[in-house]
Amino acid sequence: MLVGEQPGDREDVEGHPFVGPAGGLLDSALERARITRDDVYVTNEVKHFRWEEQRGKRRIHKKPALAHVRACAPWLHAEMRVVKPEVVVLLGATAAQAVLGNKFKVTEHRGTFVESELDALVTATVHPSSILRARDEQERSAAFDGFVHDLGFAAAALDGVRSSPSG
């Protein structure tokens, strides 16, 4: 299960998570990590798009408030009860802090599994939109490689869970 922050403008309009530019980057990273998107449940912590202004036809993203995160938490928990993920990858600080507490720092824990109250292995990585905001191609390429590595780490752990005698 991959959990992002909130829908973007395109996702809000289309009604599906990660179908905009960040979704295209996510698809590329999943492919490179040898993960089939159809094998992954993709959702967002916050279920509505919060925006601050409109530029042309696009609405500009605004970080969800804590009240939005708390209000949407029951839906995420319900999704997890239905999906029963073995591995949860939290994409970005907002999703990670919503699930793991507001002191959690992705930069300190990415690429590792962390303790949580979830009945799954839990890890966090950057949100794909952060890669799109990189200053230049070299920084973007390095960030993308790190993201692919983190997704591969989660996939390898899932393979280990499924091949263990109790998994």
Image (tube, grey):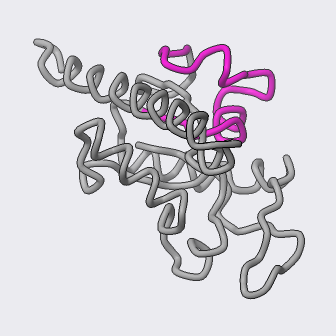
Front residue (pair 51, 22): 22
Above or below — where is 48 with respect to 152? below
Asked if residue 109 is among those painted magenta in the image, a careful observer would answer: yes
Which stretch appears magenta? 88-114
The furthest residue to the bottom: 57
Above or below — where is 81 with respect to 68? above
Front residue (pair 140, 163): 140
Q: Residue at x 72, y 22 (%)?
A: 105
Percent of width and height locating residue 130: 65, 44
Res. 48 image quadrant: bottom right
Q: How many marks?
A: 0
Percent of width and height locating residue 137: 57, 43
Percent of width and height locating residue 87: 38, 30
Q: Residue at x 23, y 49 (%)?
A: 36
Answer left or right for 62 relative to 75: right
Res. 104 image quadrant: top right
Front residue (pair 131, 79): 131
Q: Residue at x 48, y 71 (%)?
A: 16
State the quadrant of the N terminus. Answer: top left
Above or below — where is 158 with respect to 25? above
Answer left or right for 30 relative to 18: left
State the quadrant of the C terminus. Answer: top left
Front residue (pair 26, 83): 26
Res. 165 image quadrant: top left
Q: Residue at x 70, y 42 (%)?
A: 135
Percent of width and height locating residue 97: 72, 32
